[in-house]
Amino acid sequence: MKLDVVDREGKKVREIDVDDSVFGQRPHRSLVHQAFVAHRANQRQGTHKTKTRGEVAGSTVKLFRQKGTGRARQGSIRAPHRRGGGIVFGPRPRSYRQDLPKRMRRLAIRSMLSAKASDGSLRVIDQLSMDAPKTKELQGVLQTLGFERTALVVTAQPDTGVKRSASNLSRVKWLPAAYLNVFDLVQHRGLLMTEDAVRIAEALWGGERATKRRAPLPEVLANA
């Protein structure tokens, strides 16, 4: 398929051919949902913890004698039904990690990139480098290109100027192409990629890496 490349003023510069397996396939919605849930689960620390009746402070002596008082038997002040007692079936430290095969992760990313390209949420710009942070300039570029809601800005390589400019905008996030993930693609409505970032995305998730689990790392990243 073909994608239009525009400049900072929104004028079409040229058309480029892109890999259909990355930008032109039918989105796999259920897999995208699974990858999104796995990403969120892997971000959880799992350090929550409550104390059982064996861990809370308190005497082990019975509150009163068992028979002859006319009251219900009470075994311990640390019992779960008493105020200040232990917690029954409370949260304990655990890992929420969910493993996802590499080919499934890559397919989920390709599905999101294809969905963005098909619904017009993807814009390709010829270049977007900044020598210094210029928030107003980046905001103007996004408005010119029609990004009215949340936007994800993707460059080929880390760019401190673009990164710091995007960090000052509440609904804009910056990422290098190698760190694209399903979570950020779902969370942001618009996607702005440089032409070099598109080529890196093709190298990472297209070609042999679209079908083989142990495909070699692309040269554009191996030499970086």
Image (spheres, rainbow, N blue to C red):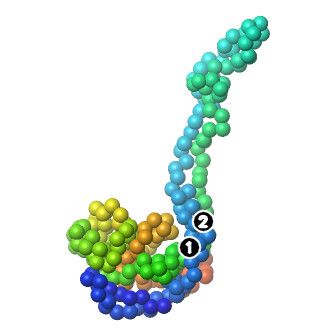
Position in image of residue 94 (x %, y %)? 60, 47
Q: Is residue 5 left or right of residue 109?
A: left
In the picture shown, does residue 49 fall above or below 162? Answer: above
Q: Which amino acid type is shown beneath numbered disc 1?
A: Ala
The residue that mark 2 highlights is 34
Q: Is residue 146 left or right of residue 219?
A: left
Marks 1 & 2, CB-CB < 8 Å contact = yes
Residue 3 appears in which quarter of the rendering? bottom left
The front one of 147 and 37 is 147
Q: Is residue 157 left or right of residue 64?
A: left
Residue 28 appears in which quarter of the rendering? bottom right
The residue that mark 1 highlights is 108
Q: Is residue 89 left or right of residue 113?
A: right
Residue at 60% over, 60% down? 98
Q: Secondary structure at mark 2?
A: helix
Quarter containing the C terminus = bottom left
Mark 1 to mark 2: distance in Å? Answer: 9 Å
The front one of 120 and 63 is 120
Residue at 28% over, 65% down? 164
